[in-house]
Amino acid sequence: MKVCRLCLILVVLDFFQLSLNAQLTYKELKVEYDSAWTYKNLQLVPVRFKETRGRLASGQNHLPALSLREALQKHKIKLQEMQYEKGADINWLQLTNHSKQNIIIQSGEIVAGGKQDRMIAETKIIAPGVTDYIHVFCVEKRRWDNKAKDFTSKGIADIELRKVMDVKGRQNEVWKEIDRQFSAQKKTSNTWSYLNLYNDSLRADTGYINYFLKKYKESDSTFAGYLFITADGIISCELFSSPDLTGIFFNNLVSSYVHFSILHGSTPSVTQDKIKDFMDKLLSNEQAQKTFIATRGRMHLFEGKVIHLVAFAN
């Protein structure tokens, strides 16, 4: 059993070797201050790798890795609650990868079903044939069905809820943030399902998604991530350890910021000096980065190496 697990780890490490050796600092990255993409209330400042990097998110047979949405739609994974004598654990799900490709799970993704809807709390790589456990938070506090429903992908949470998850990391704080959003929008719900809020706000303007997706497709693929800006403030910066990961998550990434920008934003007007000051704190070196993110973000690791980080401005 130990030998088989070692083989699986080596397979994944082989396909992600360059990714795992990457440092998400100025040593490998450059911020394109003069090449920002702006649409209405949201601005993205690209962060690129200095050198061209190969396709790093492949599974066996050099097939592209599957996103969680694709894997669920194609029935390549089994996602289920962990059962105990007194019921299911609301903060963990079990995932089995039945495909021949790596499956990439993104922090903040929402899955509807089970006995309660959940928000995934970590970015993770699930190798072919592997069963693993995913840390999640409940986002529907007043539903607990006797019979679990099949899980389906529902996109990604807005950045306000993700910030609470990443910075505070407690279930009661996640529920409090959902309550706050219901109150702010003067809405109520029988189960206080976050999806009742999120779907409505996302449909308000698909122009954001279309614009940024077009910009991404017209560019080359060396992106490590982006700095997100609205009005006179920086929202956050999200970075990944390979261009492939950035590409897999790009649509989700933009979707997460649209809600906040529509409700709370205005025309972006942050100075380059302010942006550079923030990025210097984040990218100067690995130790400074860890210190900076410790109280204002989250690092997601794979085999001890950073594969995804998010840092909030305040």
Image: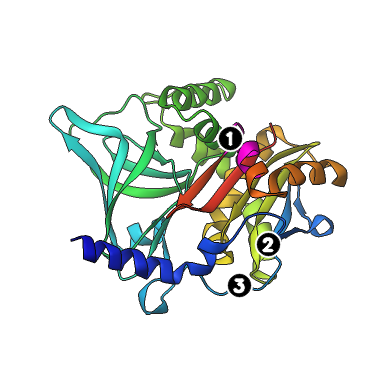
Query: What span is in magenta?
Result: 289-297
For mark 3, what is the residue?
53
- The quadrant of the image that shows the C terminus is top right
Closest to the observer, 226 or 8: 8
Question: Is residue 52 inside the magenta stretch?
Answer: no
- The quadrant of the image that shows the N terminus is bottom left
Q: CA distance from mark 2 to mark 3?
A: 11 Å
User: For the residue marked with disc 1, what is the amino acid?
Assistant: Ala
Foreground: disc 2 or disc 3: 2
For mark 2, what is the residue?
28
Q: Residue furthest left?
A: 85
Q: CA distance from mark 1 to mark 2?
A: 21 Å
Q: Is residue 35 left or right of residue 183?
A: right
| Crowding near the residue tagged with mark 1, few <14, some 14–19, many ≥20 C-alpha atoms within 10 Å | few
Q: Is residue 94 left or right of residue 290?
A: left
Going 26% across and 29% down the picture, which residue do you hit? 144
- Choose the circle earlier in sequence order: 3 or 1: 3
Q: Which mark is residue 294?
A: 1
Q: Is residue 189 left or right of residue 243?
A: left
Closest to the observer, 123 or 72: 123
Foreground: disc 3 or disc 1: 1
Q: CA distance from mark 3 to mark 1?
A: 28 Å
User: For the residue marked with disc 3, what is the amino acid?
Assistant: Arg
Closest to the observer, 219 or 187: 219
Q: Is the magenta region chiefly helix, strand or loop?
A: helix
